[in-house]
Image: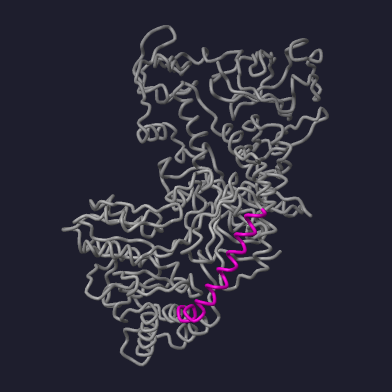
Amino acid sequence: MEQIYLDHNATTPVDPRVAEAMIPFLSGQFGNASSVHQWGRDAKVALENSREMVASIINCKPQELYFTSGGTESDNIAILGTAARFKDRKKHIIVGAAEHPAVLEPAEHLVDNDGFELDLLTVDSEGFSSADELTRLLREDTFLVSVMHGNNESGAVQDIAALSAAAHEKSTLFHTDAVQSIGKIKVDVSELNVDMLSLTGHKIYGPKGCGGLFVREGIKIAPLFYGGSHEKKRRPGTENIAGVVGLAKALEIAEQCREEDFNRLSKLADYFIEQITQKIEDVRINSPRHNRIPQTINLSLTGTEGESLVLSLDLKGVAVSSGSACTSGAVEPSHVLTAMNIPAVEAHGAIRISMGRSTTREQIDYVLAELPPIVERLRELSPIYHKK
Amino acid sequence: MSQKVLIAMSGGVDSSVAALLLKEQGYEVVGAHMKLWDYVDVGADIYKDGRCCTIDSITDCRLVCDKIGAPFYVLNMSAHFRDSVIEDFVSEYHKGRTPNPCVQCNSDIKWNTFLKKARELGCDYMATGHYARIEQLKNRRWTIRKGVDSTRDQSYVLWGVSQDALANTLMPLGSLKKTEVRDIARKHELRTAEKAESREICFVVDDDYRRFLREYEEKRKERSFIPGDIVHEDGRVMGRHEGTEFFTIGQRKGLGLTHPTPLYVKEIDAENSRVIVSDNDSLFRDELIAEQINWVGFSPIVGRNPCGFDTGEASGSDSGARTFNADVKIRYLHIPSPAEIELLTDQSVRIKFIDKQRAITPGQSVAFYDGDILLGGGVIAG
């Protein structure tokens, strides 16, 4: 059976060039970057070279970039670490309604445990938020706004520069989760005009367990961990040198092939959308037509359940997801699609196809052949779907 | 191409071996764990081992499936289970009855939602690790025969399964004994081989249904428990109780009464919030009415049964003999007792036992047998 991986927004394989770059730091150059001897110096140099590489790509100073264990940790430090600094003065936070749980749940934690107030910035049916609405939500005591750059489920790319301008107008800090956009579209902290930005390696053919947080110089945030002076005390713990090297290499490669990947995957996505809407009735494309991470296609097949679609495709060797990987298995429709006001019946029948560097036209054709009979079977069994 | 089967896996040794046997029989096996409830909802100890629906159990299923080369999925059915099975369980107690949640789960979750999921995934069958055998009789009816291992027979809780569902279900353990199942698991080094039995009601993790009811209603605040009198059948008030929900017919312990002779719960009058007690002899009755009848191996509409007993004339729906004899089981650990069953309506029967039975309990299931063949069943109304 053919095995086709179309879940690159969940994670990606490590690029062989990335693995090759990492290997020396797993055994030969295994040193602790805090050590004073040769091994330590080698590790430290690799760490700082990697920092410079990542910083130069996102256009920040190396000293503004902190390495973490990944996107979830970066988001948590950004939100909880900022909240800790403001808790006596400002108790209001605004996050996007379609954020990843790594942003939503720390924000809810602040509300449940520390007396903060939370407002959700809505998204429209394509997944976009408006700067005007943000302006209306901002208060004197708003300490942080956090809105995702590229959405993991819909692929919608927000106009972060406009949103951050609205926040800065009211002297409020702005954080963006760029985990899904980095390496796929241009991510420049200066253009986006953000104060904090989360990124990770494993969505762009780097290793799992290594990410970064950009914090603009001068902004104070409290650490979540204590126990050492690593990462200037903002993220203590012996540095994951191999991971950091891998992250930097992965990002370097992603930057090199970003435009080529973007163009190729845009065309492939357009082809898929055109074909699938011809082959199957009642398909709703939930992803926006424009301003999208091109490889992400979220679609609803009315009268089916996303779970059954995903499992049936898996039994045919095709890996896709319903909702994000962290939440699938739950019966609730995705909060992202719900936030986009997609009717429950359609949100239940949603799947996300996320293509990647290895995705070919032949693979897409295979899915285009396998999906229609599955949809037909599910609709025949559906108590709610009636053929037009 | 081989036939495809979705097997319900709890994480125990039985369903593990059932999956293995199906694989050996040449089926394309897909494993699935039904996530039915969460400790957040049902209370008690999240770290207690040996229960289904825990992360550890799911891990066991996953690794067994990996070992036998089957894909494995977790199907979250907890919202449906809560609305159907748990809600029915609680409301039955509020009505003064003693429910069989496993029966409700079998007819509404396993042989409804799960079977539908099997069909959605393109499977030809669903399968379970029950110790029971599914067979088609000469009258074309699908039935369940008691498992070969009489100590493990689970046919009693399967009376509610529809004909269509039975025709599409495989139970590979029906002809095996538990010891043999464990031996197979050991031989194939399945990690669940030595796992302890699951017992009682899966979502009442500490087997304390009274604790469960209290916590469930405390969280929802929709219904409350109404205290009342404990009354002797002769009319004397014997004491107080905190809610009829905490009693079951035949119960002796926990009544908190001082009386020279042992007293037992004879009747629960939920409407008037009274618990009626009596001596042991008064618990015996020879008749009951059962409702919500589902016919399995026998159909009174079809007429003459295939199993050798006499139903008189071929009974049409409104003529001919309306009675037949069968062995009737009135609770999980009851030995089926001979009785005459009289059809009252499509949905209800009157059952007259030859020997009086102790503690006939409204809400509990009855199952009718001819030898080891399950003919049908229902719920005791009174």
Q: Is residue B254 above or below residue A77?
A: above
Location of the N terminus of chain A by quadrant is bottom right
Q: Residue furthest left?
A: A89
Q: Horizontally, is A115 left or right of A179 in the view?
A: left
Residues in magenta, as a range: A251-279
Who's the residue at 80% across and 19% down the image? B304
* Residue sitting nearer the eye, A145 or A76: A145
* Residue sitting nearer the eye, A161 or B73: A161
Q: Residue furthest top?
A: B234
Image coordinates for residue B318, horizontal then vertical, percent: 74, 11
Q: Is residue B126 above or below residue A10?
A: above
Helix, strand or loop for the magenta stretch, by majority: helix
Q: Is residue A113 above or below residue A4?
A: above
Q: Horizontally, is B209 left or right of A173 in the view?
A: right
Image coordinates for residue A128, horizontal then vertical, percent: 41, 57
Q: Could you say which quadrant of the image residue B42 lies in?
A: top left
Q: Does the segment drawn in magenta span residue A82?
A: no
Image coordinates for residue B37, horizontal then vertical, percent: 48, 43
Location of the C terminus of chain A by quadrant is top right
